[in-house]
């Protein structure tokens, strides 16, 4: 298979239309078989649940070319599982987990020419999503849905790669206690657009959201979980019912313990203690682990001594080990790597 003529090394995290996408429809209480199609346009009712009441959720995962030339996906079963919980919370029908993984695999295979080569620094981002496509005018769940998967080759989420970013403490809340912060609902991102545009206008790369109830605890950013490192090399990551259970974060916790022999604490992290940490990173599928150098709290600067300018040593080791596992250079734990045949 011949690869597309793409400047892989200079890709940003953007959308590029690829050849095929998967579509399945839910009607009269059942999903159809679904199929790969060419048309990238979506045609739905003007009164669709997604358009009126934001009934939509999504996932994000990546495919990689390994050192020995295979195409693999990273832990797609966990995305399928998380989408199931998103659907249940939004009163949407679950797309069966095995079919979710197969749809992702089919889309990657059909777009193999867009999977960036090993060592290019780029990856193939896979975006499964579901939305209410049938008309609703009273506030209630739609009766019809579409489940789709497309993919697009991407570069780094934050410009500058390993250079540390500066983020700000947001005055907005991302998720209410007992709300939807722990699922991947489109509405969580709609509400973050105003704060992120403001942050960018002020020169910051992202927002740090605090817990909405007390504004004393660190939650996450608009698109990634936090990971901190103490001065004595312990990994600390915030635990909260209103943050998204990041697959990258869960994988890094395992890597820290089992591959690097580090101590890990998953616990509530007070905003008042973050100045004591030596390193800070943002972890997620898109972000991988991106170093945070500074947090701006209304003009007061909190600086992480070992990640002030570039990735700190522990973050770097975590990143190298995780990407090594994803790219087939380091042996993966059982079940983490799904080969696209
Ligand atoms: N938190 C939020 C709000 C996200 O959008 C994402 C991205 O998916 C993450 C965390 C990271 O999750 P994952 O590692 O599963 O991609
Ligand atoms: C991801 O990391 O997959 C995300 O969804 C983050 C962002 C692009 C929304």
Image (tube, rainbow, N blue to C red):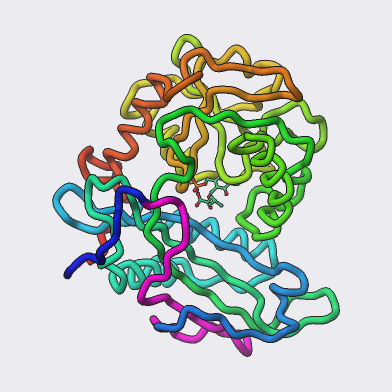
Q: Residue furthest left?
A: 68
Q: Point out residue 308 in the picture as x, y percentages from the top left corner.
A: 50, 19
In this rendering, the answer to whether 201 lies above or below 110 is above
Residue 117 vs residue 45: left or right?
A: left
Residue 336 visible to the viewer: no
Q: Taking 90 as reference, is 173 above or below it?
A: above
Residue 268, picture quadrant: top right
* Above or below, 36 relative to 341: below
Span colored in magenta: 11-37
For the residue pair 18 and 48, the one nearer the viewer reads as 18
Q: Does residue 69 sit above or below 207 in this rendering?
A: below
Instruction: Please name the residue shown 64% across and 84% down the image.
Output: 44
Residue drawn at 63 percent across, 44 percent down: 222
Name the residue at 28% across, 41% down.
Answer: 325
Q: State the image coordinates of residue 100 (x, y, percent, origin top left).
A: 44, 68
Residue reaching furthest top? 232
Picture mark count: 0
Residue 19 belongs to magenta span: yes
Which percent across, then down, holds residue 50? 69, 73
């Amino acid at each position: 298979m011949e690869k597309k003529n793409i400047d892989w090394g200079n890709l940003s995290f953007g959308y590029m239309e690829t050849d095929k996408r998967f579509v399945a429809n839910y009607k009269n209480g059942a999903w159809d078989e679904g199929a790969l199609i060419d048309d990238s346009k979506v045609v739905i009712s003007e009164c669709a649940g997604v358009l009126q009441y934001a009934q939509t959720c999504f996932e994000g995962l990546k495919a990689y070319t390994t050192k020995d030339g295979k195409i693999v996906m990273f832990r797609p079963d966990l995305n399928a599982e998380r989408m199931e919980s998103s659907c249940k919370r939004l009163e949407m029908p679950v797309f069966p987990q095995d079919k979710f993984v197969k749809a992702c695999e089919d889309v990657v295979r059909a777009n193999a020419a867009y999977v960036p080569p090993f060592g290019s620094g780029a990856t193939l981002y896979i975006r499964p999503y579901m939305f209410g496509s049938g008309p609703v005018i009273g506030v209630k769940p739609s009766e019809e849905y579409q489940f789709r998967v497309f993919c697009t080759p991407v570069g780094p989420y934050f410009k500058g790669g390993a250079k540390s970013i500066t983020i700000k403490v947001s005055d907005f809340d991302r998720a209410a206690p007992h709300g939807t912060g722990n699922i991947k609902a489109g509405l969580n991102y709609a509400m973050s657009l105003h704060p992120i545009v403001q942050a960018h206008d002020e020169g910051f790369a992202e927002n740090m959201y605090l817990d909405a109830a007390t504004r004393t605890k660190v939650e996450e950013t608009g698109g990634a979980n936090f990971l901190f490192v103490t001065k004595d090399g312990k990994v600390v990551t915030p635990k909260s019912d209103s943050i998204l259970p990041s697959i990258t974060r869960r994988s890094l916790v395992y890597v820290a313990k089992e591959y690097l022999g580090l101590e890990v604490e998953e616990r509530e992290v007070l905003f008042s203690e973050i100045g004591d940490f030596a390193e800070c990173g943002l972890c997620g599928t898109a972000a991988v682990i991106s170093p945070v150098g500074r947090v701006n709290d209304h003009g007061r600067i909190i600086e992480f001594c070992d990640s002030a300018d570039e990735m700190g040593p522990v973050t770097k080791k975590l990143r190298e080990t995780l990407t090594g596992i994803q790219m087939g250079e380091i042996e993966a734990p059982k079940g983490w790597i799904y080969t696209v045949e």
